[in-house]
Structures are given as C-alpha cells and as structure tokens.
Image (cartoon, rainbow, N blue to C red):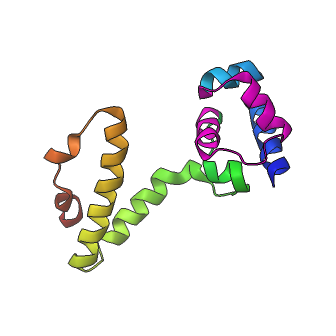
Amino acid sequence: MLQEIAERIRLRRIKKGYSQPQLAIKSGITKSIVSRYESGQLKDPSVIILDKLAKALEVSSSWLCFGDQTDYSKDDEALETCFSECKTLPIKEKRFVIESMRRVIQLHLMKKGSNFLNSYDSQDYFTS
C-alpha cells in the first residue's frame, strides 16, 4: 500500500509539472520528506503530511491514500442535487443537515479567520 501511495504522489507530481523541491514548497514540507514519501521509505506516513501533499497536488486525500476514483470535478453539481433533495426531507432531518453543514463550514472558516455564518439563515435556502 505504501508503494501505491508513493507512486500516486510521484505520478501526480510529474503530471502537475512539479519538481520535488517545487512540491515541497507548495506543500510546506521539506524536499527530503517529499523524496522519502515518493520512494515509499516511510513505514508509517503522517496523515498531516499526506493531507498537505494532497492539497498541493490538487487531489483528495482519499485518492492519494487509496486511489479513490471519485470524480470530484462535479462537486458543485452534486451539491446542488443534495440541496434539492434536502428540500424534500421532513423538517427535523432538514434541520439536522443544515446544522451539520454549518458546523463543517464554521470549522473550515475558523481556519481562515472568517465567520459569515452568524448572519446567514440556512432555513431561507430550503424554504424558498
């Protein structure tokens, strides 16, 4: 499995046109770590490092680790479909989905130092 991860990192880096030093800079890790990950030398890879590499390579962590072939290029379309389907849920389930989404978005925005959700009424989206 580690060799498969190493190969995916290497192939994606080459596809993106990055050298190992460029990938190191883009991911915020050292060139030696990039080299060790690409060669499969690490027995216990760090989830944090894999996530940084995935972001720099513009792939999902799932793809990097497991070769997940999900087409994430249609995320916006899938999200719109989910929103449409949510409109048909009973109010209790609808509120659960809304609050779950809010929590995920708030966690993401906290990392960026922004918090527009306090002024956003999620029920407006589903009741219109």
Query: Looking at the picture, how far across and down is residue 13, in whole percent?
Result: 75, 32
Query: Looking at the picture, how far across and down is residue 42, in whole percent?
Result: 78, 42
Residue under the point 25% across and 80% down: 90
Decide whether residue 53 is among the magenta residues. yes
Q: Nearer the viewer, residue 91 or 84?
A: 91
Decide whether residue 46 is among the magenta residues. yes
Q: Is residue 50 visible?
A: yes
Q: Is residue 18 visible?
A: no
Query: Looking at the picture, how far across and down is residue 78, in whole percent?
Result: 48, 59
Residue under the point 61% across and 32% down: 56
Q: Nearer the viewer, residue 27 or 43?
A: 43
Residue under the point 73% across and 19% down: 21
Relative to residue 98, is residue 53 drawn left or right?
right
Picture quadrant where residue 32 is located: top right
Relative to residue 110, is residue 47 drawn left or right?
right
Query: Compared to 73, does 90 lie above or below?
Result: below
Picture quadrant where residue 54 is located: top right
Q: Which residues are magenta?
A: 27-56
The quarter in which the N terminus is drawn is bottom right
Query: Looking at the picture, how far across and down is residue 53, in whole percent?
Result: 64, 36
